Image (cartoon, rainbow, N blue to C red):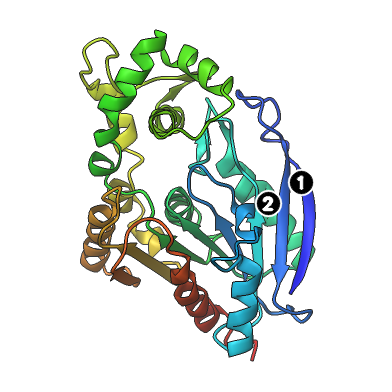
Amino acid sequence: MLIGSYEIESEVLKDNPLNDPYVRKVYILQTSENVSKAPIVIYLSGFFSSSITLLNYDPLSESITEKLEKLYRQGSIRDLIFVLPDLFTKLGGNQYINSTAVGLYEDFLIKELIPYLKDLYGQRDIIIMGKSSGGYGALVLGMKYPEVVSGIVDHSGDAYFEYVYLPYFPQAIRQIRKEGDHYNWLKKYWGKVNKKEREDLNTLYIIAMAAFYSPEGDKIVLPFDLDTGEIIEDIWKKWIEKDPVRLIDKYTENLKKLKLIYIDVGIKDEFKINFGSRILHKKMLKYGIKHEYEEFEGGHFNTSFRYDISLSLISKVFSNDNS
């Protein structure tokens, strides 16, 4: 397994509102030296994580290098280029779309990272693969840029926001009220040594989603009244407009241009994403969008064993000439 580490200085991320790094690390794995015809797979991580954590050694599970080596040795995958960009933000993660309150991460991926990879390896198929928030990013980028993206793999990507986010609103409201507003809450949170308390993560999650879905300039606008808890319909509507189960109606023809759409989800998903995934599946059937859809016994976490299936499918679809 060949591993390369690069740093990309981004123009579009300079002066981002959170002062997050604009020089971004990218790790690239090659299954062999012969990748002249191999597709490029860009992996986007879930929230509260970074793609490069897949490289970490864990004695109880496979790292991504071990997984790729195993699948390649078994003949389950052919040559491919696997890309791990670090796009973590101070808000705990990324939704991989442009936000005036977070940064232009959609532009970074489409206008900077992918051209960089094509300069490095030449013209070839680009597949965006992601888990959870990364699955959301894969879906949205595939919908919007079929001229750039050839295929998408969505493992439990955020969909049908009513079930995914609304249950966390009351807890976030209670937590934010203690500090007066969400900016004071963020300031206190960022000053903590232990940043992994569950209540804190749930609150940060909702503030972060507001930053991606309903920013106004560099301001993070919450979709509820902090005093009463009432949902502010005009703001909530901005969230809903970015929900894949709504976006699909707008981008139907774009999705039909993709060579691969793979969606899977656990039937016991703790964020109830299985409902949104099934809605997407039914809409794709209705619109005649070719795709692969699977529900499996399991939840939202510890599901990297599903990557064996999606990576094998990527090789089947995109590496036929690389035998």
Q: Position of residue 228 (x, y in %)?
A: 21, 12
Who's the residue at 46% across and 51% down the image?
Answer: 144
Q: Position of residue 1 (x, y in %)?
A: 74, 74
Tell which of 183 and 35 is nearer to you: 183
Relative horizontal placement of residue 131, taking residue 161 as reference (left or right): right
Q: Position of residue 183 (x, y in %)?
A: 48, 14
**Mark with earlier residue (1, 2):** 1
The C terminus sits in image quarter: bottom right
- Classify 10 Å Cα crowding around label 1: few (below 14), some (14-19), many (20 and above): some
65 over 144 or under it: above or below:
below
Residue type at the position of mark 2? Leu
Who's the residue at 40% across and 56% down the image?
Answer: 301
* Callout count: 2
Image quadrant of residue 207?
top left
Tell which of 48 and 7 is nearer to you: 48
Q: Is residue 321 visible?
A: no
Disc on res. 113: 2
Q: Is residue 67 visible?
A: yes
Image quadrant of residue 233?
top left
302 over 174 or under it: above or below:
below
Find disc 1 in the rendering and name its residue: 8
- Circle 2 sits in a helix, a strand or a loop, which is it? helix
Disc on res. 126: none
| Furthest residue toward front | 59
Residue type at the position of mark 1? Ile
Tell which of 128 and 62 is nearer to you: 62
Q: Are marks 1 and 2 in contact (CB under 8 Å)?
A: yes
Image quadrant of residue 22?
top right
Q: Position of residue 138 (x, y in %)?
A: 47, 55
